[in-house]
Image (cartoon, grey):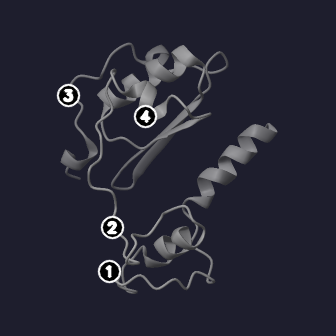
Amino acid sequence: MGRSRVLLALAALACFLPAPASAATTIPDVSSSFWAHSQIAWATSQGWVPLRANGTFAPKRDATRLNAANALELIGGYDVVLDGSDNFETRYLINDFAVSRGIPWIYGAAVAAYGLTMPVIPGRTACLRCVSRSVPQGSRPCASARW
């Protein structure tokens, strides 16, 4: 296994590891019994997730839907794109954009106990359109899949 694959595997694994015990940030609106409390506290202590001015955590709710018109603005300035979207239309859009600009991208998907990833490195690996030319018929977003 090449060095880059090992680093990629370690980075992916780190996403599922529990946060270090040193994360003792108090966040008033996140109960200490919440399943992701330690990860949120750790991410805020590292500066990866900013807290609001009053010290509370509230995810950004005014998310912008990715489309062809805003793809350059939203993902054009990155060296790699990590995709956890829940639908094929978005994945194909990211694929086409990333491949056309030579940007590596990795998608991950999970429903119930099943999950998969696909790293796409333009010019080196197959892309999503290489594997399947169009959106699979009958596909549904993860949220609508009932297992």
Give the label, 3 or 4, closer to the camera: 4
Please rate how many residues cluster around mark 4, counting C-alpha atoms within 10 Å: few if below 14, some from 14 to 19, many from 20: few
Q: CA distance from mark 1 to mark 4?
A: 29 Å
Q: CA distance from mark 3 to mark 4?
A: 28 Å
First in sequence, mark 3 or 2: give its number.
Answer: 2
Q: Quadrant of residue 103?
A: top right
Farthest front residue in view:
53
Indicate the amino acid at tag 4: Leu
First in sequence, mark 3 or 4: give its number.
Answer: 4
Q: Is residue 45 above or below residue 143?
A: below
Q: CA distance from mark 1 to mark 3?
A: 39 Å
Viewer-side residue, 22 vs 71: 71
The residue beneath circle 1 is: 29
Q: CA distance from mark 3 to mark 2?
A: 34 Å
Element marked by disc 2: loop
First in sequence, mark 1 or 4: give its number.
Answer: 1
The residue beneath circle 3 is: 138
The residue beneath circle 4 is: 74
- Residue positioned 38% across, 55% down in the render: 113
Indicate the amino acid at tag 2: Ala
Element marked by disc 1: loop
The numbered dot on residue 58 is: 2
Please rate how many residues cluster around mark 1, counting C-alpha atoms within 10 Å: few if below 14, some from 14 to 19, many from 20: few
First in sequence, mark 1 or 2: give its number.
Answer: 1
Q: Position of residue 111 (x, y in %)?
A: 33, 50
Q: Quadrant of residue 123?
A: top right
Q: Is residue 141 visible?
A: yes
Give the label, 3 or 2, closer to the camera: 2
Indicate the amino acid at tag 3: Gly
Q: Position of residue 35 (x, y in %)?
A: 39, 76
Q: Is residue 129 above or below residue 26?
A: above
Q: Are marks 1 and 2 in contact (CB under 8 Å)?
A: yes
